[in-house]
Amino acid sequence: MLTTELVRFKELGKQITVLTAWDAISSSIVEASGADVVLVGDSLGMVVLGHNTTLPVTLDQILHHTQAVCRGFSKPLSKQPLVVCDLPFLSYQCGEDKAVEAAGSLLKNSSASAVKLEGAEPETLLVIKRLIRMGIPVMGHLGLTPQSVHQIGYRTQAKDKESQDKILKDSEMLQKSGCFAIVLEHIPEEIASRIQKDLTIPVIGIGAGEKCDGQVRVTADLLGLSNKQPPFAKPLIPGRELCINALKEWIKSTQLMESHHENI
Ligand code: KIV
């Protein structure tokens, strides 16, 4: 699927579904579920690498996991979900050349089609424009931007008038700079809804209410596998409990087999 197709989804009023994946097992499950987009998010730093923030994630790790995600698909390429991968911390903050090299290496060495990066500061807008001129589609990300956790924390953003005006302006700037979609994370529903109406590109929400053009979720959160569930991602199933109980059953049955052998 081309990134431009998502704009058509918005025009048609078709909700866009985005799920994260981090390896071949998770991507094969997400592909089979029918999600439109697979995001290899830097949340993998917390979900699968055990870090407290996304900051330690490296470009090599994003590439390694993106390649595994792409290998997990079983449909022909044209029928696979669109793969977007995060540009990790410090891969695009140090200038346009470094960003083109980082994003280019992800698209060159995997079947990912686009990158996502956080914020809309003037330097970031220059990076976005340069990437797009070089043929690399970019998804924006505003609101709770986890790479700025030391400045903004993990709390709801855009609560006061000043920051609401800023996010409205930033989202317009991302569209003007050429982003094909933006993620809005953990902001009030009314603001997300205004941005959804103002922009012609799709607005994908997480913790931003239901009035977006689509929703993105960390798959491990939805499946109840994460130790720390964010408040805006209620698990659909108690995944951890189900897995632990299944494994306990297996251990019990193995021990029963052992004692049976001992008694023969
Ligand atoms: O890294 C990630 O998984 C993300 C989503 C939460 C949007 O950026």
Image (cartoon, rainbow, N blue to C red):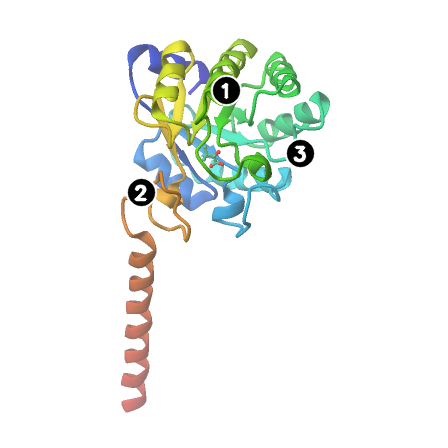
**Relative to residue 101, is residue 219 drawn left or right?**
left
Q: Which of marks 3 and 1 is in front?
A: 1
- Residue at label 3? 90
- Residue at label 2? 234
> Percent position (x, y) of residue 189?
34, 25
Amino acid, disc 2: Lys
**Relative to residue 225, is residue 13 drawn left or right?**
left
* Mark with earlier residue (3, 1): 3
State the quadrant of the C terminus. Answer: bottom left
Q: Does residue 80 show up?
A: no
Which labelled disc corresponds to residue 64? none
- Residue at label 1? 162
State the quadrant of the N terminus. Answer: top left
Cβ–Cβ below 8 Å for labels 2 and 1?
A: no
> Percent position (x, y) of residue 216?
39, 31
> Percent position (x, y) of residue 126?
65, 16
Residue nearer the viewer, 242 or 63: 242
Amino acid, disc 3: Leu
The residue positioned 40% from the left and 24% from the top of the image is 204
Q: Does residue 202 show up?
A: yes
Image quarter for residue 231? top left
The answer to whether the residue bearing label 1 lies less than 8 angstroms from the nearest atom of ligand 1 is: no
* Mark with earlier residue (3, 2): 3
Image quarter for residue 185? top left
> Percent position (x, y) of residue 92?
65, 28
Cβ–Cβ below 8 Å for labels 3 and 1?
A: no
Secondary structure of the residue carrying numbered label 2: loop
Q: Badge 3: how crowded within 10 Å, few (<14), some, or many (20+)? A: some
Separation of disc 3 and disc 1 at Cα?
27 Å
Amino acid, disc 1: Glu
